[in-house]
Amino acid sequence: MTSSNKAHWNSRFATTDPEALTWFDPDAGITVGLLERFGGGEISDLIDVGAGNSRLVDELLAKGVKDLTLFDLSDEALAQTRTRLGPRAGDVAFLAGDIRDWQPKRQWNIWHDRAVFHFMVSDEDQAAYISNLDLATRAGALILLATFQPGGAGKMQRLAGCAP
């Protein structure tokens, strides 16, 4: 994403209450359940791509999950998460960057992305994303990838029966 995209997301996170964001979800239980179910019951060594100021990290830390990395284009979103976590932020790695030109320095066992791939609309963006996903994950890694509906994000709604 261009620097204007970074500025856009920094501004969006700086000027909007997290609960007012259409993609905000105060409860990451469905995601945690999917991670436990498909990760063999144990969650560790996870990168959350497009972490924003999501509450997923709070729930994972509360469960005692180790080796958590939050990756986002927005420095502001990551700063908000650091502040919210307080002393627990020391148990999390924070990476700010553009997924398309990122150079992973390690590999993870779990890749979680709740929306970033949705914004990869060109063939070039999608290829760069997939290349970095491949470089950043170990063989046999669990990849939990979600996107919005074609029209974009609507306010998150829980669907009956969608829990894992």
Image: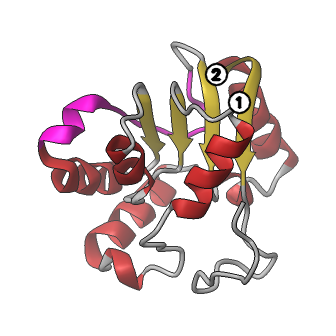
From this view, report whether residue 97 is shown above or below residue 131. below
User: Quick check: 97 left or right of 78?
Assistant: right
Quarter the C terminus occupies:
bottom right
100 is within the stretch colored magenta? yes
User: Quick check: 99 left or right of 79?
Assistant: right
Q: Position of residue 82 (x, y in %)?
A: 22, 47
Q: Which residues are magenta?
A: 87-103
Residue pointed to by mark 1: 133
Image quadrant where residue 19 sits: bottom left
Secondary structure at badge 2 equals helix
Q: Position of residue 146 (x, y in %)?
A: 72, 57
**Can residue 100 be spotted in the picture?**
no
Given the current orientation, which residue lies at the most extreme right position?
123
Rendered image coloring scheme = secondary structure
**Can residue 15 be spotted in the picture?**
yes
For the point 43% across and 63% down, which residue is it? 9
User: Quick check: 152 left or right of 42?
Assistant: right
For the point 39% across and 59% down, which residue is it? 55
The residue under label 1 is which amino acid type? Leu
For the point 39% across and 52% down, which residue is it? 59
Gap between marks 2 and 1, in whole Å?
A: 5 Å
The residue under label 2 is which amino acid type? Ala
Q: Residues within 10 Å of mark 2 (few under 14, many from 20)?
A: many
Q: Which mark is residue 136?
A: 2
68 is within the stretch colored magenta? no
